[in-house]
Image: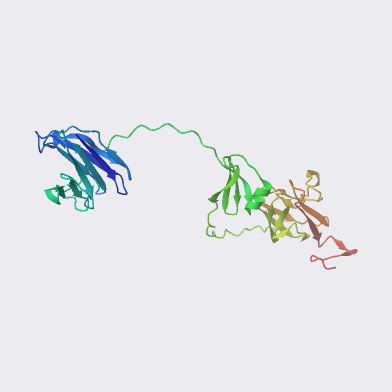
């Protein structure tokens, strides 16, 4: 009876073949009795055969497609005694008579212990070249369609994560916001906003200048950059809820980037009121992620307000000066100088 143990000491999986050549049909590969053929042994794993019955003169052949497989063969005969086959780089310690050692650093030599030393008794045949690849099998059937995933809806943008959390302490599956250059989405598993990484790419090259219009449009004297600090204030050109001074007859532009905070120009500053919205000379009043143009009419009141539709605290004063207004009863020019 004999058994073989194979251990993968390498860094990649190995294919192992273990076979018996019967004594009465030597030299014929087709007469071998394969115990395993091309068995894959993963890194760090081992395999032990079942007990194989042998006849005197039978041979056990063991091979692998890498040099990092250690083999150990144990054979027990009817008479007392046993033979160990060891595949390792160092000479075995305390061997018994009949033990076989194959040096893994020079695995062409097969040595047997005679009681005092290991003597070479045979030379293993070298590994032949890799055979040609077999014919590819047919393509398997297409698998079943998986369940439909959930989408993501970008609901707005914030300058900082703190501003996002101030307005939205919780969310729903699929909710997402742009924060700076990153996208944050609501994780229902962790119940928190998760940074999904950079969302906005680098700014592209400037396009070619378009054709000059034959119709002159209004000249914009100032473009205000409007964002928000959570729901506590509008941030206009770096200041929170600043007082603005605009001149009659001039055109101004408000570039609004304050998702969820519609920017309204109105005649009152005590909260949004559709009845008090001021639309004279105003284009696209109430935008939260776009531009608002305001050409100051000669009859505009001396005081207007900008007001968030959703938050009372996001409010500021707009002073209107210039032609049509008065200071201490005297008419003023376009600069406000009497």
Residue 180 percent location from the top left of the image: 60, 54
Residue 275 percent location from the top left of the image: 80, 44
Residue 10 percent location from the top left of the image: 30, 49
| Viewer-nearest residue: 303 or 135 | 135
| Viewer-nearest residue: 225 or 150 | 150
Which residue is pictured at 78% across the width and 44% down the height?
Answer: 274
Decide: is 241 above or below 312: below
Q: Is residue 35 left or right of residue 212?
A: left
Residue 112 percent location from the top left of the image: 15, 47
Image quadrant containing the N terminus: top left
Identity of the residue furthest to the bottom in this view: 337
Which residue is pictured at 24% across the width and 44% down the height?
Answer: 71
Whether residue 289 is visible: no
Image quadrant containing the C terminus: bottom right
Q: Is residue 126 left or right of residue 220?
A: left
Q: Quadrant of residue 140?
A: top left
| Viewer-nearest residue: 150 or 264 | 150
Identity of the residue furthest to the right in this view: 329
Q: Quadrant of residue 302?
A: bottom right
Whether residue 94 is visible: yes
Decide: is 332 above or below 64: below
Specify how the rendered protein is coloured: rainbow
| Viewer-nearest residue: 298 or 51 | 51
């Amino acid at each position: 009876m004999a058994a073989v143990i194979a251990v993968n000491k390498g860094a990649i999986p190995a294919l192992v073949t273990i076979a018996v050549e019967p004594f009465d049909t030597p030299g014929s590969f087709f007469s071998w009795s394969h115990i395993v053929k091309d068995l894959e042994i993963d890194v760090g794993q081992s395999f032990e055969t079942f007990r194989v019955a042998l006849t005197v003169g039978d041979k056990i052949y063991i091979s692998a497609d890498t040099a990092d497989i250690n083999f150990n063969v144990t054979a027990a005969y009817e008479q007392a005694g046993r033979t160990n086959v060891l595949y390792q780089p160092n000479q075995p310690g305390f061997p018994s008579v009949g033990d076989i050692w194959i040096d893994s650093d020079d695995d062409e030599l097969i040595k047997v212990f005679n009681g005092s030393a290991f003597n070479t008794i045979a030379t293993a045949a070298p590994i032949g070249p890799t055979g040609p690849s077999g014919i590819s099998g047919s393509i398997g059937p297409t698998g079943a369609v998986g369940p439909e995933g959930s989408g993501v809806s970008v609901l707005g943008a914030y300058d900082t994560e703190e501003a996002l959390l101030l307005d939205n302490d919780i969310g729903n599956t699929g909710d997402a916001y742009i924060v700076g250059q990153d996208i944050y989405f609501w994780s229902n598993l962790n119940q928190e906003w998760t940074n999904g990484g950079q969302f906005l790419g680098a700014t592209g090259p400037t396009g070619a200048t378009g054709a000059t219009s034959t119709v002159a449009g209004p000249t914009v004297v100032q473009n205000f950059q409007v964002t928000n600090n959570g729901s506590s204030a509008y941030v206009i050109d770096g200041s929170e809820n600043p007082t603005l001074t605009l001149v009659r007859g001039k055109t101004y532009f408000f570039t609004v980037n304050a998702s969820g905070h519609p920017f309204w120009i109105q005649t009152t500053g005590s909260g949004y009121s559709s009845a008090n919205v001021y639309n004279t000379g105003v284009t696209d009043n109430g935008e939260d992620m776009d531009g608002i143009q305001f050409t100051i009419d000669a009859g505009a009141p001396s005081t207007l307000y900008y007001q968030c539709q959703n938050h009372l605290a996001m409010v500021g004063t707009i002073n209107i000066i210039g032609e049509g207004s008065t200071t201490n009863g005297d008419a003023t020019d376009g600069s406000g100088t009497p």
